[in-house]
Amino acid sequence: MKNRHFTIVHVETFAPATLRLTYADGEQLQVDLHDVIARHPTLARLANPAVFAQAAIGQWGGSIVWADEDDLELAADNLRARAIEQAGGYSHELIWNWMAKHRLSLDAAAEALGLSRRMLAYYRSGEKPIPRTVALALLGWEVEQHQAA
């Protein structure tokens, strides 16, 4: 994976279902996977603390794997997004989901938010953290569009 901010270089496990991940960009984040495990039957084996404790870094640091099984693998970018959101921040997925929901191109989304195309691309890629002002602008834009309709 070429994006250092999505490449895991170290993983630690904590009971009952928490990972502490260190990414190649130096960021260290903690993510609680209890809800994810409970919602997805394919991950049910991870509810067993002995299995969860076997977490390992997947190929090229792009995921966390358990027991070398394809169905017990979680992507590094999704883990980072969950960790950021659990810490009260805004993940890159917020931008992706907002753009998809409103069928906006990068140019149209940047114009709607009053941002440069490049800055929005940084936020969308996860390369730069999304400021609260941008997250609030997404909500404000939705309200404005709803009122105009």
Image: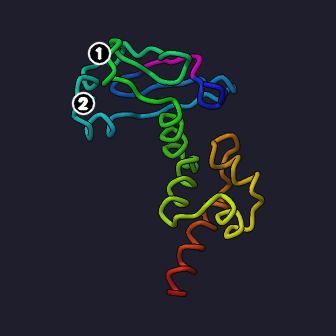
Quarter location, residue 24:
top right
On screen, residue 83 above or below 74: below
Q: Which residue is mark 2?
A: 42
State the residue at coordinates (49%, 86%).
149
Q: Main secondary structure of the magenta part?
A: strand
Callout 1 amino acid: Val
Residue 120 point in image, percent of width and height: 70, 54
State the residue at coordinates (48%, 18%).
12
Q: Which residue is mark 1?
A: 51
Which segment is the magenta one?
8-13
Residue 60 visible? The answer is yes
Residue 58 point in image, percent of width and height: 47, 17
Residue 133 visible? The answer is no
State the residue at coordinates (58%, 64%).
104
Residue 64 point in image, percent of width and height: 45, 22
On screen, residue 61 above or below 117: above
Quarter location, residue 23:
top right
Relative depth, front residue between 111 and 49:
111
